[in-house]
Amino acid sequence: MIGLCMDYLEGKLKETGIKGKVRTTEKELKLCQDSHVGAVLFEKESFTRSGSKKVYSEGESKKKRTKIFNRQSYFSVTIGEYSIGKCEEIFLKFMESLDRGILDEKGNYIYLEIEGAEWVDEKDSILRSKMAVQILIRFDGGIYKDSVYGNLQEATIENVEEV
């Protein structure tokens, strides 16, 4: 899930005006000498137990998907620019481009929520940008286990005893 979410956010940054490499580590971000910068950093992840179940059919078989854990992954997206107007323009395009969520490779929906944004000017930033904004984004997904129900037509009764 982490790789999928990072790729999604990196793609959105590039779509909305970040040219060049999108930084993915704090070290890369600190060493960056550009005033025009975009970064996606993984912050943290939390888990809570879940027991929700969903029964669905796939072809001829009937399956049960159990959500074992709720999974929340947090990312910070940084946009830095040489001018305040350009930074806000990219920020607004980025926010408008975000979907409500994404699908993982197994078809599970991962919700996307914006936790907040923090604006920083050049005096308070490690970046060379005149203005930067850091957006905290949360993805809500899960860890699932699938079970296949047996087909009753394939079952055979071998022995019946009276009690």
Image (tube, helix red, strand yellow):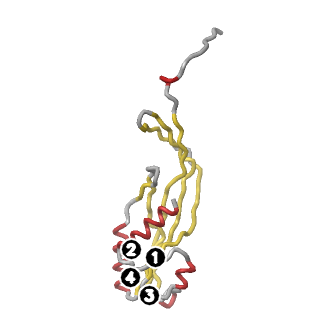
Point out the frontmost of discs 4 and 1.
1
Circle 3 residue? 35
Q: Residue at x 54, y 85 (%)?
A: 31
Q: Earlier in the sequence, mark 1 or mark 2?
A: 2
Pick out the residue farthest to the right. 163
Point out the frontmost of discs 3 and 1.
1
157 or 161: nearer the eye? 157
Q: Could you say whether the residue bearing mark 4 is in a helix, strand or loop?
A: helix
Q: Is residue 68 positioned above or below 111 on the image?
A: above
The three-letter amino acid code for the residue at tag 3 is: Ser
Horizontal and vertical percent for residue 112? 44, 61
Q: CA distance from mark 3 to mark 1?
A: 13 Å
The three-letter amino acid code for the residue at tag 1 is: Val
Circle 4 residue? 87
Circle 1 residue? 22
Q: Is residue 42 positioned above or below 102 on the image?
A: below
Mark 4–mark 3 CB contact (< 8 Å): no
- Which quadrant of the structure image shows residue 80? bottom left
Q: Could you say whether the residue bearing mark 3 is in a helix, strand or loop?
A: loop
Pick out the residue farthest to the top. 162
Q: Quadrant of the C terminus?
A: top right
Point out the frontmost of discs 3 and 2.
2
Q: CA distance from mark 3 to mark 2?
A: 16 Å
Mark 1–mark 2 CB contact (< 8 Å): yes
Mark 3–mark 1 CB contact (< 8 Å): no
Q: Residue at x 41, y 36 (%)?
A: 59
Mark identifier at residue 14: 2
Horizontal and vertical percent for residue 48? 59, 53
Q: CA distance from mark 4 to mark 1?
A: 15 Å
Q: CA distance from mark 4 to mark 3?
A: 11 Å
Horizontal and vertical percent for residue 113? 44, 63
Q: Earlier in the sequence, mark 3 or mark 2?
A: 2
